[in-house]
Amino acid sequence: TMVVLPADMVLTSACDRTTRLWSMASGECSRVLRTRQGDIRAVAFSPDGTILVTAATDGSIAFWSSVTDEYEAETQIWVHDSGVLSVAFSPDGSMLLTASEDCTARLWCASTKKGKQMLRGHRDIVNSAAWSPDGEYVVTASSDGTARLWEALTGKCVHMLLGHQAPPKGAVGWPSPRYARAVSSVYSAVF
């Protein structure tokens, strides 16, 4: 996973249980975050940039505080029965969305770290999940050949998006709060 940060930094994660911060100007690694988690599959920063979340193959997510620039792991919680493949903060930073190899996506309260909704319906791995810009909807993409649009508040599946010749690996774009475009060639969800 790779994320470009506003402060000319790039954040990468790898299957060596590390997340690294890189300077875009120099190309140098400025910090290595090591975790007790399984291999890191996804990373997300809170909208205000104070919290980093790493998601791993062991079904856990870890919260890292970046307020002091020390990036100390504050909490690690197990959120899925299998590896977490995608993690994203809601636009206002109050919720987290995770997608997993256990065929579900889940919504979490970011401050209490308590589960709010489980999004069930996919019959195979949920490869990625992303929020609508207004935070009212989420979209998931699964190896079952479908992408699904969900109401975030209720967890209700609003639409099943069909038609790919290969299983969708991610979802990109959000032309309006009601529609997402799923694509087969990428592994992450981006708005």
Image (tube, rainbow, N blue to C red):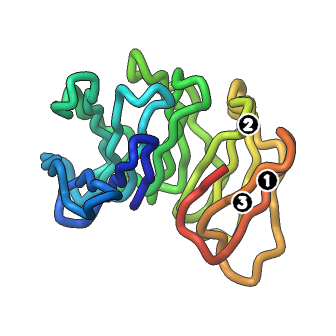
Residue under circle 2? Answer: 137
Q: Nearer the viewer, residue 50 or 170?
A: 50
Q: CA distance from mark 3 to mark 1?
A: 9 Å
Q: Position of residue 20 (x, y in %)?
A: 23, 54
- Give the labeled residue for mark 3: 147
C-alpha gap between disc 2 and disc 1: 10 Å
In the rendered image, residue 63, in percent from the top left (x then y), is placed at 29, 32
- Comparing labels 3 and 1, the label whose residue is closer to the camera: 1
Query: Considering the numbered disc 3 on the image, is that residue within a helix, a strand or a loop?
Result: strand
Q: Is residue 109 left or right of residue 65?
A: right
Q: x, y percentage for residue 134?
A: 74, 30
* Mark 2 or mark 1: whose residue is earlier in sequence: 2
Circles 3, 1 touching at the beta carbon (< 8 Å)? yes
For disc 3, the neighbor class at 10 Å (few under 14, some 14 to 19, many from 20) is many
121 up-or-down from 67: above or below: below
Q: Left of 94 or right of it: where is 24? A: left
Instruction: Please give left or right for residue 174 compared with residue 20 in the image.
Output: right
Q: Going 60% across and 56% down the picture, which residue do you hit?
A: 189
